[in-house]
Amino acid sequence: MTALTLPDIAAQANHTFLPLDWVGMCNIAVPVLFDGSTLPATADAGVSLDDGAARGIHMSRLYVALDVFEDQTLTPSLLRRVLDGFLQSHTGLSAAAFLALRFELMLKRPAAISPLAGWKAYPVTLNAQLKDEVFHVELNVELDYSSTCPCSAALARQLIQQQFLADFSERTLNHEDLLTWLGSAQGVVATPHSQRSTAKLQVRLNNDIDALPIKALIDQAEAVLGTAVQTAVKRADEQAFALANGQNLMFCEDAARRLHQALRSMSWLSGFALRVEHAESLHAHDAVAHSQWHW
């Protein structure tokens, strides 16, 4: 019996001549090798369809090209090779290739005081593009931190002052009474509000860098913010965190400015955009600030 040739519908001519900007697949399960560990990731892979007469692209060729991530360390040069492969497998059809990888980077973080430590997951997205032989990579990370409102802190201090006058205006002050009062609920009648906050950083890497400085970016951002959320804690760690928040009051505008200055000092990036969100505990809405440079 003569073997039948399988039909290739995608190779048939398109009756409506119209190029398309992006054609491909989203949410492909793929393992990526980074910093010595294999991480579960999802990928979006696509190319432009510049030949408007072609009905479609060869999606299976994009899918197979992602196999390299399983056993090769994730670097900008590897991303470039994958995108080159996308275009080589679509010669005559496509002039641009795109790839997005999403995964979580797990970092072990020590407690502030005690010997405890715990894991934190940081969402990471890599966006790579090769168009007209121009290649660039964008690195996106998210991290959580605590923010205490400066206005709320000032109002709380004023209430504590008023309570002090009410309790001691007609009493002789002595050290023991004052110390007891400061440690009582009667003395600290108000506390400032604080909230878990999120920083979303998008940075474009210089073309001469062949590393993904994800951890360096996270470490520097958490350092300038000063109050990264904690993992495993004992009471001593919780107290240290309360002290750090009390000495690190910030509006969302303050957080955005700190991050902007920190990112400007990083020589391995050529541009960035950032967004901070303070999930208000006072309001039912969030406070937000944006900043960018060469974006």
Image (cartoon, rainbow, N blue to C red):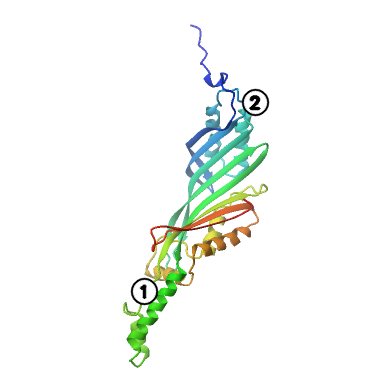
Can residue 233 be seen in the rendering of this structure? Answer: yes
Camera-nearest label, 1 or 2: 1
Q: How many marks?
A: 2
How many C-alpha atoms fall within 10 Å of the one at disc 2: few (<14), some, or many (≥20)?
few
Residue at position x 52%, y 42% in the image: 101
Amino acid on which the number 1 mark rests in the picture: Ala
* Residue 262 falls left or right of residue 116: right
Q: Give coordinates of residue 231: x percent, y percent.
A: 41, 60
Vertically, is 78 above or below 107?
A: above
Q: Position of residue 281 (x, y in %)?
A: 39, 62
- Judge by depth and name the residue closer to the eye, 113 or 259: 259
Name the residue tied to disc 1: 190
> Could you tell me if residue 116 is visible in this image?
no
Q: Amino acid at mark 2?
A: Gly
**Which of these two is toward me, 216 or 293?**
293
Taking the spot 36% from the left edge, 85% from the top edge, the residue there is: 165
Q: Residues within 10 Å of mark 1 (few under 14, many from 20)?
A: some
On screen, residue 53 above or below 263:
above
**Extreme residue toward the top, this view:** 1
Q: In the rendering, at what x and y percent does residue 191 appear?
A: 38, 72
Q: Is residue 150 left or right of residue 85?
A: left
Image quarter for residue 91?
top right
Q: Which residue is mark 2?
A: 92
Question: In terms of image quadrants, where is residue 259?
Answer: bottom right
Asked whether the beta carbons under mark 1 and mark 2 sit within 8 Å of each other, the answer is: no
Could you tell me residue 31's position as x and y percent?
49, 40
Please say if 73 is above or below 15.
below
Question: In the image, what residue occupies the spot 51% across and 39% down?
Answer: 43
| Mark 2 residue element | loop
Left/right of residue 270 with respect to residue 172 in the rendered view:
right
Whether 106 is drawn above or below 223: the answer is above
Label 1, label 2: how many angstroms apart (C-alpha)?
69 Å
